[in-house]
């Protein structure tokens, strides 16, 4: 399988000179293989919808928090999230589940995920949902799902059927870890995408699992902000530009972060049903190389941090700031120049790149979140934390970037 994946990685890499697919890089791991017994679900989202926000919903059987697009139809689809039972779901586009299918009904993945969050408590609930949805379902996806009963699996799903890949099955996932980019393993691999990102993620995650470093902070820094390429063996961290104000452009195709990456989420599930209220979600909105991770809990109530909440213009402050910073990373917008990143704006020897400047800000958020976890994650404590996050980010962005984060 690895030799075949290597071949299609090369074919896919060449194809990327022609087309940028809307795609994602994801993984999940069973709680049986994590230090605290809590499963994890991770998604690096690639899309043409750059404005992303978080929203708290009460329109279903269960309350849930989801990643949404910054459009007027934002409430109709969810692109990753979890509900109050500890059930969580993400997706990647697969591109090879419906080969030969001429169905015009498509792009329903976000609708299916919203419905799942509204109604599902377990993997079996989700399976029943897929079985009972009208066919064709309008999807070509790998759905990653975890629940509070120890379930963790991918569902490679086409218009008319699905196949389950169980992370608790040693024959399928010897270390409880499964990865999906933009191909389903059950189908013709030469018709999918994302093979280079798959191999990059596989190398990082297998080593992280061995070193017991599967934490949200590590994952954002080493997956969402990964600057290595599994095919070319390029490591952009080894080529640091000397100065911030002297642009140095690097070819930037098929890294895990891409010009079309709009968000990253890491859902830390519940270790069992009795602790379902302890499930939570970290989110990086905008562009991982120019943004920071912020945590949210359903247990905190409907008032999420202002930084990640959509305003009247369908924009969240932290996402808008990230996209503003991103313009310096891709300053030339004509002649396919978005295939080249200005590495000087991202990392440099002066340590003034966005990744370097934002790291201490994000580290402080992780530190304060750790303090909260040591207390009790009550609604009151979480709301106090949210208020601190907004105040802290507002001050930090003004001091570091002279940017008023909450200015309309």
Image (spheres, rainbow, N blue to C red):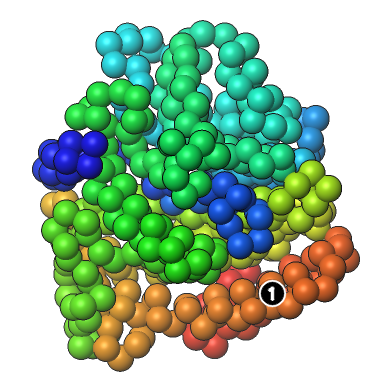
Regarding residue 84, the answer to whether it shows in the image is no
Say which of 265 and 309 sits in front.
Answer: 265
| Quarter occupied by residue 77 | top right
| Quarter occupied by residue 16 | top left
- Check disc 1 and report its element: helix, strand or loop: helix
- Which corner quadrant holds the C terminus? bottom right
Say which of 101 and 325 sits in front.
Answer: 101
| Badge 1 density bin: few <14, some 14–19, many ≥20, Cα 10 Å | few
Residue 284 x/y as whole percent:
52, 60
Residue for point 60% across, 50% down: 32
Residue for point 75% across, 70% down: 373
Residue 163 x/y as whole percent:
46, 22
Residue 370 x/y as whole percent:
69, 74
Note whether 217 is above or below 83 in the view shown: below
Q: Which residue is mark 1?
A: 370
- Which corner quadrant holds the N terminus? top left
Note whether 333 is above or below 294 in the view shown: above
Q: Is residue 312 left or right of residue 189?
A: right
Regarding residue 293, the answer to whether it shows in the image is yes
Residue for point 59% across, 32% down: 113
| Quarter occupied by residue 377 | bottom right
Residue 385 x/y as whole percent:
76, 71
Say which of 186 and 57 sits in front.
Answer: 186
Residue for point 43% across, 36% down: 172
């Amino acid at each position: 399988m690895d030799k075949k994946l290597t071949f299609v990685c090369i074919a896919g890499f060449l194809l990327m000179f022609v087309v940028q697919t809307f795609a994602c890089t994801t993984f999940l791991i069973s709680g049986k293989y994590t230090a605290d017994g809590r499963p994890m679900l991770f998604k690096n989202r690639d899309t043409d919808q750059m404005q992303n926000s978080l929203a708290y919903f009460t329109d279903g059987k269960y309350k849930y928090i989801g990643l949404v697009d910054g459009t007027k139809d934002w409430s109709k689809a969810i692109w990753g999230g979890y509900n109050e039972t500890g059930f969580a779901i993400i997706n990647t586009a697969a591109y090879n589940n419906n080969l030969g299918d001429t169905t015009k009904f498509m792009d329903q993945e976000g609708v299916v995920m919203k419905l799942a969050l509204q109604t599902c408590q377990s993997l079996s609930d989700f399976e029943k949902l897929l079985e009972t949805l009208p066919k064709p379902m309008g999807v070509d996806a790998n759905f990653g799902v975890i629940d509070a009963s120890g379930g963790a699996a991918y569902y490679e799903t086409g218009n008319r059927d699905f196949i389950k890949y169980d992370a608790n099955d040693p024959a399928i996932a010897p270390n409880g870890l499964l990865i999906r980019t933009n191909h389903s393993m059950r189908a013709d691999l030469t018709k999918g995408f994302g093979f280079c990102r798959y191999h990059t993620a596989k190398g990082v995650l297998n080593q992280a699992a061995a070193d017991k470093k599967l934490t949200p902070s590590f994952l954002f820094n080493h997956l969402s902000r990964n600057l290595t390429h599994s095919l070319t063996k390029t490591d952009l961290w080894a080529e640091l530009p000397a100065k911030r104000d002297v642009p140095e452009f690097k070819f930037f195709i098929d890294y895990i972060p891409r010009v079309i990456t709009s968000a990253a989420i890491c859902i830390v599930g519940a270790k069992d049903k009795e602790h379902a209220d302890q499930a939570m979600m970290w989110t990086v909105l905008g562009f991982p190389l120019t943004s920071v991770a912020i945590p949210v809990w359903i247990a905190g109530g409907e008032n999420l941090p202002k930084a990640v909440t959509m305003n009247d213009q369908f924009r969240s402050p932290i996402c808008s700031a990230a996209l503003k910073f991103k313009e310096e990373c891709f300053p030339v917008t004509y002649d396919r120049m978005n295939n080249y990143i200005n590495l000087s704006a991202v990392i440099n020897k002066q340590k003034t790149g966005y990744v370097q400047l934002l790291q201490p800000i994000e580290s402080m958020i992780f530190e304060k979140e750790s303090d909260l976890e040591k207390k009790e994650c009550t609604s009151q404590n979480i709301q106090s934390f949210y208020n601190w996050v907004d105040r802290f980010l507002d001050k930090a962005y003004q001091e570091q970037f002279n940017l008023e984060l909450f200015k309309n």
